[in-house]
Amino acid sequence: MKTYAEINEKIASGSAVVLNAEEVSDYVDRKGLSATAEEIDVVTTATFGPMCSSGCFLNFGHSIPKIRITEAWIDDVLTYSGIAAVDLFMGASQLQNNDSANMYYPGEFRFGGGHVIEKLVARKELQLCALSYGTDEYPRRELRTMFTIDDLNQAVMVNPRNCYQNYNVATNTSDRPIYTYMGLLKPRMQNLTYSSAGQLSPLLNDPYYDTIGVGSAVWLAGARGHVYSEGTQHTGSVERTENGVPAEGAGTLALTADMKQMRPEFVRGVSLKGYGVSLSLGVGVPIPILNEQILQYTTVRDDEIKAELIDYSYDYPMKSGKVIAHLTYGQMKRDEVEVNGKKIEVSSMSSYSKALHIAELLKAEIQNGDFLLSEPMQKLPQNNKSKSMVLREGEGGAVK
């Protein structure tokens, strides 16, 4: 019914009609699917929450004399230097040097890679310490210097796995509290936590990856970025409801964008007691309304999206496959749910209000002609499954 070129032409002329994924459902109820599909050009989706599989490549330029960095730390957080002379990779979940981790359980994990990335985007000053074995053309063996993101040639966020399409709901059936990446889980199912923007979440509004694919433009923490691959652990072949929504974790996106264009409020380092460090990110994805079916998918509501409630004290770490119950986001947003006759308090690791704010910011950029869409060059896989690690006995003896 519409093409990317036609929609982009309307965006460029300032005449595109854009709604966010929260408001489009009521709009379709009032106007009808066919009429709305004719009228609406883009629906904006968004999410904000911890995304551990994130990181960034940094290029520092050459010192005098030159150095081929083989070990490096930024604010005492180890970076990966096995790339080239002055290129480094900082992972969001990397711990600060000498962090006691969980030696004194539960560890506090006050600072790590996610906090370094937050400081970079906020244009704060950081310290680089670097070592080298020295070579003829790179004779320098060590350096220590202060820098900000504006001193770097490039600072590029490259995230292997973001924007999970649905995810577990976590609880704890054991008799002791446990500390997880889903937060503190109290004993005997006293609480549960989830992490999703639900009806605003990008891949829940495009369940079969009709418009979100490799090359799709995304709003990554305020910068224009794109999907560069399916995300790691992407699993297209899962059980789905009649409207296509997965009932479990499914698709993921690998995202990249220029950090120098990002906004600090959408890039925040996270400390997770007893687990580690992470990075909370804001992501917005526009969905072009090419036809009625694509529009229909964007009308999904929280009461129609179910997620699996998993026991993180045993079933999650042991991959038992057991599911306690299926809960809708509509239920969980009421702050208390009932499971097997027991009332349980609910909290979210993600922020729906920030996700809605991002959807509105992206909407405004499109309406102002500042954000054009890009047609995917390749679709995300729909029929693949995620494999478990294979443990094999090698020459050195049995695997434990």
Image: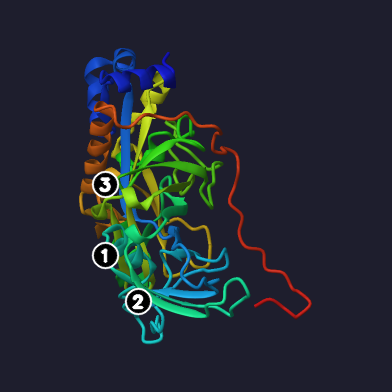
Per the model, the C-alpha gap separating discs 3 and 2 is 26 Å
Residue 292 point in image, percent of width and height? 39, 18
Q: Secondary structure at mark 2?
A: loop
**Above or below for 364 versus 115:** above
Residue at the image position 32 percent from the left and 46 percent from the top: 47
Mark 1 or mark 2: whose residue is earlier in sequence: 1
Closer mark to the observer between disc 3 and disc 1:
1
> Which class describes the residues within 10 Å of circle 3: few (<14), some (14-19), or many (20+)?
some
> Which residue is labeled 3 in the image?
331
Which residue is at 42% across, 55% downward? 154
Q: Give the structural element (helix, strand or loop) at label 1.
A: loop
1, above or below 169, in the image: above
According to the image, what is the colour scheme of the structure? rainbow
Amino acid type for the residue under numbered disc 1: Lys
Q: Which quadrant of the figure has residue 20?
A: top left
Sequence-first disc among 3 and 1: 1
Rendered position, 106 above or below 180: below
Q: Amino acid at mark 2?
A: Asp
Residue lying at the far right of the rendered structure: 395
Q: How busy is the neighbourhood of tag 1: few (under 14 within 10 Å), some, or many (20 plus)?
A: few
Picture disc at residue 175: 2
Quadrant position of the C terminus in the picture: bottom right
Which residue is labeled 1 in the image?
Answer: 124
Q: Position of residue 101 (x, y in %)?
A: 40, 80
Residue shown at the point (49%, 58%) measured from the top left: 322
